[in-house]
Amino acid sequence: MHVCREKIGDGTLLTSIWDNTNGTVNLYFYHQYDKTIQFNIKEELAKGNHILKIDSLFPKNTEFKKLASYQIPHNNDALRLFLVFCGLFFAMSSIYFFVNYIKNRKTNKFNSIKLLLIPFGFILFYYMYVLNTTVNIFYFASPYKSSLNPIISITSYLPFVLLVIIIPLIRFNFKLIQEKLWNTFALMILSLNSFLYLILIGFFVYWRFYFNF
């Protein structure tokens, strides 16, 4: 028996069948049970401590190659740092929009929109933390359901929220720029938020947060 998940095909990496009578072990690699390599246990122990690169012992495995090339924050430091940057930026944006809202609550047109941006930035800050600390999100079916933390399960719907709001947000962003309704720095912060949302949506598509096939 073995595990092979639908989303990216990960699951049982190695399967071994031990023959204690003859002192051998048959090794199978990543869901390919028509190919095996047999080891003599006494001979292997006689070699002392040594390491074998298992995938190189077997014929090319397309399914494993797909898994090995799958990039997530837990195997790609650049992605991890990007999500950390996004999280910090979203949190700082929320603080800025809160201060900006207080200062301009009576004079700035569309100032009330900031009341939505403030909590949303903090929510995304938490979601960036979740993505950096919960590896199962990237391998199990979407939206991900956590048996230990229902809050994480709820955050799994954030990619869908971003997908719904991105077009209205970008249109609103352009309107503010064209009519110069906010100060330049506020427009820059909003525009960078929109840009990061677009990049994140691209990663969410790659990570199959919207579909599982």
Image: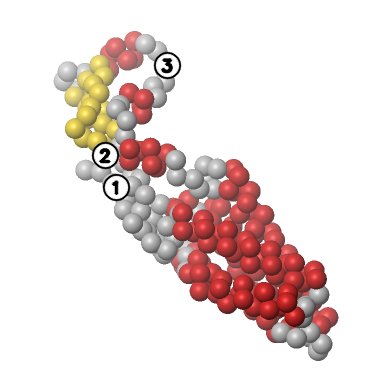
Query: What's the amino acid at mark 2?
Result: His
Q: Which residue is mark 1?
A: 4
- Checking the image for residue 31, the label placed there is 2
Image quadrant holding the N terminus, namely top left
Q: Residue at x 19, y 32 (%)?
A: 34
The C terminus, quarter of image: bottom left
Give how far across and how far down residue 200 sits, in percent: 56, 59
Q: CA distance from mark 1 to mark 2?
A: 8 Å
- Give coordinates of residue 44: x percent, y percent: 32, 15
- For the residues carrying marks 3 and 1, which lies nearer the camera in this image? 1
Residue 125, how many percent across, how many down? 63, 63
**Residue drawn at the location 21% of the way across and 18% of the way down:** 23
Could you tell me if residue 91 is visible in this image?
Answer: no
Distance from Cα at disc 3 to Cα at disc 1 = 31 Å
In this picture, residue 95 sits left or right of residue 199: right
The residue that appears at 32% across and 51% down in the rendered structure is 5
Q: Are marks 1 and 2 in contact (CB under 8 Å)?
A: yes
Q: Is residue 110 left or right of residue 69?
A: right
Instruction: Give the amino acid type for the residue marked by disc 1 in the picture.
Output: Cys
Mark 2 lies on a secondary structure that is loop
- Specify whether residue 200 is in view: yes
Q: Quadrant of residue 147?
A: bottom left
SS for dot 1: loop
Residue drawn at (25%, 23%) of the image: 37
Mark 3 is on which residue type? Asn
Residue 49: mark: 3
Q: Nearer the viewer, residue 110 or 93?
A: 110
Quick check: 77 above or below 158? above
Between 54 and 25, which is closer to the camera in this rendering? 54
Residue 170 image point, x, y percent: 62, 72
